[in-house]
Amino acid sequence: MGEKQTILVVDDEARMRKLVRDFLTKSGYDTLEAEDGVSALDLFFERQTEIALVVLDVMMPGKNGYEVCREIREYNKTIPIIMLTAKSEERDELEGFAEGADEYIAKPFSPKILVARIGAILRRTAPDAGETVIETAGIRLDRAAHTVTIDGKEVELSYKEFELLDYFLQNKGIALSREKILDSVWNYDYFGDARTIDTHVKKLRSKMGDKGDLIRTVWGVGYKFEA
């Protein structure tokens, strides 16, 4: 797979870190490990140019995963973050997305599934050999540079917001169900609530300003981008 990509694994359970590390190593990744939120942030800011993705536990002593996610997002809007949690309540999941998480996996989980999701995310964030720039209605999305400008002004989007906007632009004028968006943008069989999509669309619309109105709600179906 060429040069190895490095994954930062943050969990206060040594057994869990070893389990994830072993599967990642077998799959050809390098890993960095942290046992709490403070050391995770120290490691992230020291080595962030090397880190391709962060796997982040929610329940940790000191700084919890939500706090770590928030601090990473203040400095890096695009690095993918997968949050792990023993909690399964919907409000906890939505809090994770609100802080900028891209994916959310409830414990116990299959390490094979985690590695598959990591691979899917990293493939989607890799530069695409095909068309790299989409422009419409004053919105310019550059996949290779992972940037979005609206009327010439750069807009900072998280990895998942960027993917969501990209999908809308590719499917301009088409009504898209929440299920289809989940399947296409999240790229796996997602068993959560459709409100996951609503949360991301709300944040994306907010960051797009007036252009956010181009993402229209199709009642009883989902959403449609109309330029």
Image (tube, rainbow, N blue to C red):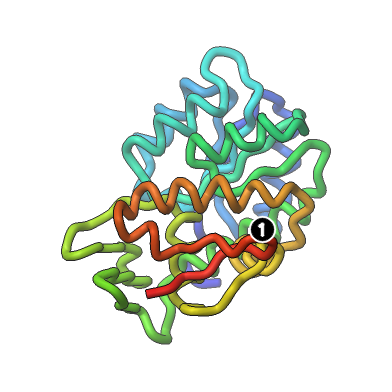
Residue drawn at x 54%, y 13% as measured from the top left: 62
Residue 48 lies left or right of residue 15; in this view the side is: left
Residue 54 lies left or right of residue 104; in this view the side is: left
Q: Nearer the viewer, residue 70 or 27?
A: 70
Extreme residue in the bottom direction: 130
Find residue 15 and report its horizontal and vertical position in percent. 76, 31
Compared with 103, 99 (above or below) is: above
Residue 27 visible within the image: no
Residue drawn at x 62%, y 65% as measured from the top left: 181
Q: Nearer the viewer, residue 13 or 181?
A: 181
Q: Quadrant of residue 126?
A: bottom left
Q: Quadrant of residue 91?
A: top right
Residue bearing the label numbered 1:
117
Residue 112 visible within the image: yes
Residue drawn at x 40%, y 38% as measured from the top left: 73
Q: Nearer the viewer, residue 78 or 62?
A: 78
Tell me the crowding category of disc 1: few under 14, some 14 to 19, or many 20 or more residues within 10 angstroms, Cα based.
some
Residue 116 lies left or right of residue 31; in this view the side is: right
Residue drawn at x 53%, y 62% as measured from the top left: 122
Image quadrant holding the C terminus, namely bottom left
Extreme residue in the top direction: 62
Compared with 64, 93 (above or below) is: below
Amino acid type, mark 1: Arg
